[in-house]
Image (cartoon, helix red, strand yellow):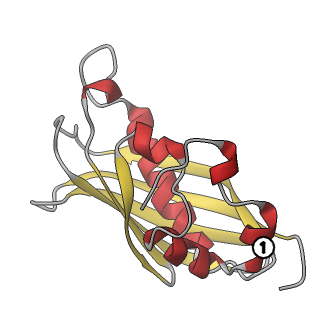
Amino acid sequence: MFTATTLEELPDQTTVLSLSGLEFMQAMLRGEIARPPISDLLNYSLDQVAPGKVTFRGTPEFGHTNPLSGVHGGWYGTLLDSCMACAVMTMVPKGSVYTTLEYKVNLTRAIPLGTEILAVGEIDHVGRSTGIAHGEIRGANDGKLYATGSTTCLIMKIADG
C-alpha cells in the first residue's frame, strides 16, 4: 500500500465510479489505489477487506495524545469512522458513492501508547440510500475492548453502474 501525498495521487471521480465499493477497497488493499493521507498521519492501515466487513490495524503514538497524555478521543473516532464507513462502502454499487452522515463512539478504556489495535467495522444494513454499521477497537494481541461505535452512511447514486 502507498499513501497519497498529493491530490493528484488520490483516485479521481471517474475511477471511483467505475468500481464497486468492494472493488475499490480491494484495490486499495492490493496497493493499486493510494490510501488517504490521514491514515499515515494517524498511523493506521487497511488490514482486511470482505463484503460487509473491513479491518484496520493501527498503533497510537505520542503525537496522538491529548493534554493529559492519553490517546485523544479523535483517534478512536477516526479509526471507528474509517472501519465502519468502509464496511458500508464494500456494499456500495458501481456508479455510487457514500459519506458518513453521523457516527457515535463509546470509549470503554484507555489505549496505552504503542499498543497495536484492530478496528473492525461490520454492516448491519445497507439499502439504496443508507447504510448502517457498527465497529469495535480491540487490542491486536490480547483482544481487550477499547471502544465501540455505530454509524449511518448516506449512499448516493451518481451514474449508472
- In this view, the residue farthest toward the top is 67
Q: Looking at the rendering, in which quadrant would you find the C terminus?
A: bottom right
Amino acid type, mark 1:
Leu
**For the point 59% across and 81% down, which residue is it?**
23
- Residue 14 image position (x, y, % from top left): 81, 69
Q: Is residue 159 left or right of residue 3?
A: right
Front residue of this view, candidates 93 and 149: 93
Q: Residue furthest left?
A: 142
Quarter of the image holding residue 88? Answer: bottom right
Percent x, y for residue 143?
15, 62
Pick the residue in front: 138 or 22.
22
What's the residue at 42%, 50% (across, down)? 79
Q: Could you say where residue 100 lies in the image, as x and y percent from the top left?
A: 66, 55
**As drawn, is 89 to the left or to the right of 35?**
right
Q: Residue at x 39, y 39 (%)?
A: 42
SS assignment at label 1: helix
Extreme residue toward the right, this view = 159
Check the image and report above or below for 58 versus 56: above
Q: In the picture, residue 148 is in which quadrant?
A: bottom left
Look at the image and tell me in which quarter the N terminus lies. Answer: bottom left
Count of labels in the image: 1
Residue bearing mark 1: 17
**Residue at x-position 72% and y-position 64%:** 98
Label 1 CA crowd tier, 10 Å (few <14, some 14–19, many 20+) = many
- Determine whether 74 is above or below 89 in the image: above
Q: Nearer the viewer, residue 119 or 3?
A: 3
In the rendered image, residue 9, in percent from the top left (x then y), is placed at 63, 52
Q: Is residue 94 left or right of residue 33?
A: right
